[in-house]
């Protein structure tokens, strides 16, 4: 499993005032847990996290944390299970790291990428995308950058739902009946349009 490496220190004080002081100094309070190991409060550099999250996999990037403790240095391989941000500034305020191994299965959200031009759009239909992300369960070494959704068989009054997606790389855990994308006839609202057959099906 290829990972990005960052350094961290064990966090001794876990109060709110201490967390605020850490953020002001350019650090982020975080916690490492999972895989039957103890939960460990840690401190990581904010800039290091931002650089990783700007990469191809974003916050889904597997990370090797080189953790400095009183007993020495240890390594933890993790993914960012939860990232809390300030609602106004969007600054990272806290991260929950989940321990993983090559045998682990993790649940996370990946973006959808629409590819191709829908035939229904070529004849005057309107493309409506309902969701932009997909929830999946996957091994850390197979985390995709995005999931492609082909529009090449999508006609007017046809749609693609989660249940129409096929993949062997991971398991989709989003609701099967959730609409991903549809082509509707122009001049009709979404509520007025009768749902058509899934793309490529009659």
Image: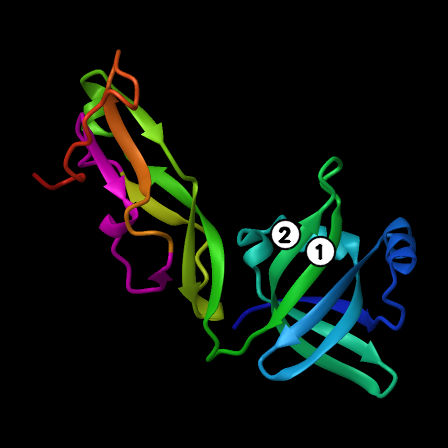
Residue 53 bears which disc, if any? 2
Q: Quadrant of residue 43?
A: bottom right
Helix, strand or loop at label 2? It is: helix
Residue 120 position, x and y percent, is 19, 25
> Which sits in the foreground, 26 or 117?
26
In this picture the colour scheme is: rainbow
Is 199 situated left or right of 107 in this image?
left
Q: Position of residue 134 (x, y in %)?
A: 41, 50
* Mark 1 lies on residue: 49
Q: Residues within 10 Å of mark 2 (few under 14, many from 20)?
A: some
Identify the residue at horizontal 48%, vertical 76% (top origin).
Answer: 104
Please say if 187 is above or below 152. above
Label placed on residue 22 = none
Q: Visible in this render: residue 64? A: yes
Residue farthest toward the front in the current orientation of the protein: 191
Toward the top, the furthest residue is 187
Q: Helix, strand, or loop for circle 1?
A: helix
Residue 74 drawn at (x, y percent): 74, 82
Q: CA distance from mark 2 to mark 1?
A: 6 Å
Residue stretch in magenta: 151-173
Q: Is residue 117 visible?
A: no
Q: Is residue 195 magenta-colored?
A: no
């Amino acid at each position: 499993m290829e990972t990005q490496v960052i350094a961290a220190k064990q966090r001794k004080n876990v109060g709110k005032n201490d967390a605020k002081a850490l953020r002001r100094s350019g650090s982020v309070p975080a916690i490492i847990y999972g895989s039957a190991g103890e939960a460990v409060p840690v401190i990581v550099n904010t800039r290091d996290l931002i650089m990783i999250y700007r990469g191809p996999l974003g916050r889904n990037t597997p990370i090797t944390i080189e953790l400095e403790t009183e007993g020495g240095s240890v390594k933890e391989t993790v993914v960012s299970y939860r990232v809390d941000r300030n609602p106004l500034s969007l600054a990272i305020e806290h991260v929950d790291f989940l321990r993983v191994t090559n045998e682990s299965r993790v649940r996370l959200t990946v973006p959808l990428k629409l590819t191709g031009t829908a035939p229904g759009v070529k004849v005057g239909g309107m493309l409506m995308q309902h969701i932009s992300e997909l929830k999946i369960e996957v091994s850390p070494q197979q985390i995709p950058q995005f999931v492609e959704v082909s529009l090449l068989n999508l006609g007017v009054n046809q749609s693609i739902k989660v249940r129409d997606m096929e993949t062997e790389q991971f398991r989709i855990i989003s609701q099967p009946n959730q609409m991903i994308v549809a082509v509707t006839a122009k001049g009709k609202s979404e509520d007025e349009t009768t749902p058509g057959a899934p793309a490529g099906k009659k």
